Amino acid sequence: MSTIANQLPIAEVKARVCKAIEENMPRLMEIAERIMAAPELGYKEQKTSAVVQEVFKELQIPFTTGHALTGVKGRLKGKDSKYTVAMIGELDAILCPKHPRADELTGAAHCCGHNVQIANLIAVALGLQAPGVMDNLNGDVVLFAVPAEEYVEIDYRNKLREEGKIRYLGGKQELIYEGAFDDIDMAMQMHVNPATTPTGEMGLGSTSNGFIGKLIDYHGKAAHAAGAPHEGINALQACMMGIMGVNAIRDTFKEADYFRFHPIINSGGDLVNVVPDYVSMESYVRAATVDAMVDGNFKVNRALKAGADALGATCEIHDLPGYLPMRNDAVMNRFLKENSIPLFGEDNVFQGEHITASTDMGDVSHLIPVIHPWVGCIKGVLHGADYEIVNHDVAFTKTAQALAMTIVDLLYGEAKGADEVKAGYKAVFTKEEYLQFMDRIAEGK
Ligand SMILES: [Zn+2]
């Protein structure tokens, strides 16, 4: 079979992709609803994973399972395999017991819209399966349903670590470690966001903060709080001095680094008339670059320990590798923008600003080019009890059309789009360097 005979103009390829996605909108909404009805937290997404596997079987997409416990990886073959582009959807829900659709037993709910991501993953698959499309692409498309984006249930995940079932707490981190990204050249995913206009909008992803997780324990000496405070060492005062120390150096962090330190005290003493001999605190240190994260974390640890020194207490700090800052690829973003304007209208496509929260897609972005647009289609608060999709067109059709057409731009013909992305991208880490960095954080170095 001659590939030249099969050659379609790129506009025709895109038109076929868009038509297939639009025609399948009811089916896509039904898939999102099935997942909404059975929300599961990270590394526990067995039912959600089964839904993806069932749909892949229906669509005759070959796939492998068990990636980072629950991940499902499908593949559509192009006419040649010059590159592999991944479309990612996240499987996990969050904890939000007050959401009307929350699971009564676990409190999990899909109020971060990851079920919409899975629908978009399937939508892209359906679009690319339209007749003649993959025959015109010089590369494969991996359809990757991935676990555990939300960094929650740390104790549960640490138990999985101790049992040897996972090595890292974040799903994409674990997938990188397992080698599931080794055969992927570039990747994309969407994320829902509150809509600011009735028509909804495409916010092209920018940068976001990364973070280091911190467990901090202060140890002092118990004594009667009124009768013999001179015999005690107050761990709560030491902890407060530590927090004040961090507050004292806040203005030494550069504005451009978007430094964040937001601790909570989990245990602040047991009995009011006993000098607290143990206080435990938890926090993240967040910043916009790896260097700023590491530097900020060093200074925070110094201040926290100084709080203990002031009182004669001790301070134990256990750092956990969190997520790396996010870097959206400019060339891929340009393709996404061009494809989004006809669908959303020029006024509703914009370049997003820096986000001070974090995602494990940031880790992937340090190894390969990625895009992570924020798509305005919900009302209420992300992670909130009032979260609700209001713009179904944007959530289930337009976003997937824009992303699928971007894949066409990357891989069509001789895959010159993907060539351009590769040429402009500079990885921050190799996989080996990345894993070494993660281990260094965990070892407190
Ligand atoms: Zn999310």
Image (cartoon, rainbow, N blue to C red):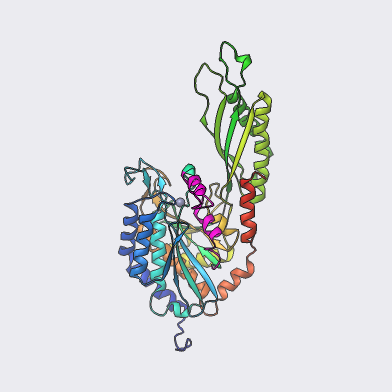
- In the image, the segment drawn in magenta is 156-183
Q: Residue at x 52, y 77 (%)?
A: 81
- In the displayed orientation, state which residue is furthest to the top: 227
- Please tell me whether residue 357 is drawn above or below residue 79 in the rendered image: above
From where the camera sits, is residue 42 visible?
A: yes
Q: Is residue 47 above or below residue 184?
A: above
Where residue 47 sits in the image (x, y, percent)? 35, 55
The residue closer to the viewer here, 18 or 134, is: 134
Residue 151 at x, y = what percent?
49, 47
Q: Position of residue 370 (x, y in %)?
A: 55, 62
Residue 307 image-quadrant placement: top right
Considering every residue shown, the one lying at the far front of the view is 163
Q: Residue visible at 56% across and 48% down?
A: 322
Residue 24 shown left or right of residue 437 in the figure: left
Regarding residue 342, the answer to whether it shows in the image is no
Q: Report x, y in % for residue 412.
A: 51, 77
- Most foreground residue, 214 or 130: 214
**Quick check: 146 left or right of 330?**
left
Q: Residue at x 46, y 84 (%)?
A: 7
Number of numbered markers: 0
- Does 427 appear above or below 16? above
Quadrant in the picture for the N terminus = bottom left
Q: Quadrant of residue 278?
A: top right
Residue 163 counted in the magenta span = yes
Does the magenta segment cover residue 185?
no
Front residue (pair 62, 201) = 62
Q: In the rendered view of the protein, which quadrant contains the C terminus?
A: top right
